Amino acid sequence: MKIQLLTFSLLSPIVYNWACGAALADNNKNEVVEPQLPNVIIIYADDLGYGDLQCYGAKNVETPNVNRLADEGLRFTNVHAVAATSTPSRYSLLTGEYAWRKKGTDVAAGNAGMIIRPEQYTMADMFKHSGYVTGAVGKWHLGLGDKTGEQDWNAPLSASLDDLGFDYHYIMAATADRVPCVFIENGQVAGYDPTAPIEVSYKQNFPGEPTGKDNPELLYNLKPSHGHDMSIVNGISRIGYMKGGGKALWKDENIADSITLHAIDFISQHQNEPFFLYFATNDVHVPRFPHERFRGKSSMGLRGDAILQFDWSVGQIMKALDRLGLSGNTLVILSSDNGPVVDDGYDDQAEELLNGHRPSGPLRGYKYSAFEGGTTVPAIVRWPKMIQKGNVSDVLMSQIDWMASLGELIHARLPKGSAPDSWNRLSNLLGMDNTDRPWVIEFAANHVLSIRTKDWKYIEPNDGPRMITWGPKIETGNDSIPQLYEMKKVSEQENVAAQYPEKLFEMQTLLRRAKLG
Ligand code: NG6
Ligand code: CA
């Protein structure tokens, strides 16, 4: 039986009809058919910019699989990650709470304790309690264990993703540029090597262990450009110190293969029941060291090659869904945790080889920034059974709403107080309603908040430097005076605060009220 709801323009009829679909009478056989809830996969890229995919105008790199996903689904042009860095964006996506409300949600070290606490209600809890099997594969970056620095990596961790509603998890604790460089499967180091016990410190090195700073001769070609000069693993120096790991240490060139295979295994194993998969890729974060199948294959060096590898991972997931006959009833959401960065700490020639490619597309600013390039990200949603294919939407949307929206989709009952900042905007997500979110809040790396509507953007005043001082050459968005931009001109060039004092006041009031919750 076909459910055709695409003509509805408001959320309530969609929900009504979808809910009614919970028990459809099949007239021919005169029996009740329970339609299966859709599977949900979030493919969450790392540092993939608004302009980095071909279907968003990327130059010098081909992304046929993502293009196909967009052709078969709905491509958004005004979607915002909550923050301009990873940890706070992921925190917000998975809890429905703005990271700027909560201390300790800045970019996490690899030995951070669990930032989302077990008592918090997460997106995974929501799916699990609605009858889904839940999985997380790839980059985590939200802490593990009870307390920072107190994990014993040689035993099952004291707190892990099963405390947050994930049935299965195969993850990297933080990022590829942070120790420990091992995968953690269901709360224990995967392929643990008892001959090489693991020790981790973010304070001091372990006696006799080489570092990028003291032993540059041991480094592979990929030298640090800023930071990243501590422990050396696979010839690449990282942030933080570690010892041991032996056979369990990951090989950077195999990370994409490894997490993609684990994601596909999870899908295959749960093909006969509704599943939720959070698939967070390592691409295109530093250190960029893709498999040799991709190295040298784009004209933009390792950063371009990492985009090719990301596209490959997406293609593998799509192929697996096709093979298993699951594509029609699987809602795939593809997006990124923050804007792009070119040189993020390793000399990989990303800057020199751009050759006209603009990672943020037409937007000002990059990762870390209060300007739009910091949080505006690609977003594609495909669900052949319910979403008309091939459309593009400029609706203003924030990832903060995905928890409540997906909750609506699966008829979840969220406990009081959970996902406090997440609004049900399911109709936006499914392309059935083009009403913009009234406003979206953006959280820059330096904690400056901006609020934007479809037409205006206000950036809070801040005395900090205009350019990042600790590494990448990126505009922070800081100014000591209030900034107001007309967003019809996407480039945020002219501060019109003085011309439109009333609008400025209105936006400031909007932000003040939003902060109150
Ligand atoms: C920065 C790192 C950068 C990256 C970032 C987090 C330095 C000099 N730079 O501190 O390389 O790891 O943190 O990126 O250490 S994120 O996408 O995970 O937020
Ligand atoms: Ca990131």
Image: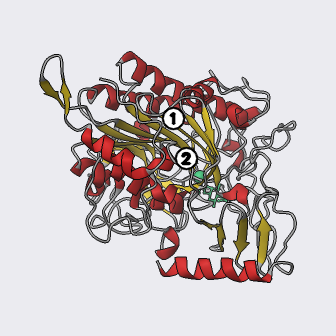
Q: Point out the image quarter for the N terminus.
A: top left
Side (left or right) of 229 relative to 234: right
Q: Which residue is mark 1?
A: 255
* 392 vs 458, nearest the viewer: 392
Mark 1 in CB contact with mark 2 (< 8 angstroms): yes
Relative height, residue 374 to residue 65 (above, below): below
- Residue depicted at x 53% and y 59%: 89
Amino acid at circle 2? Ala
Instruction: Measure the C-alpha gap from mark 1 to mark 2.
Output: 9 Å
Relative height, residue 383 to residue 153 (above, below): above
Residue 322 pos. (x, y %)? 42, 19
Secondary structure category for the residue under label 2:
loop
Residue 184 pos. (x, y %)? 37, 45
- Residue depicted at x 41% and y 25%: 327
Q: Which residue is mark 2?
A: 176
- Residue depicted at x 63% and y 60%: 84
* 31 vs 515, nearest the viewer: 31
Relative height, residue 465 to residue 159 (above, below): below
Residue 99 pos. (x, y %)? 49, 68
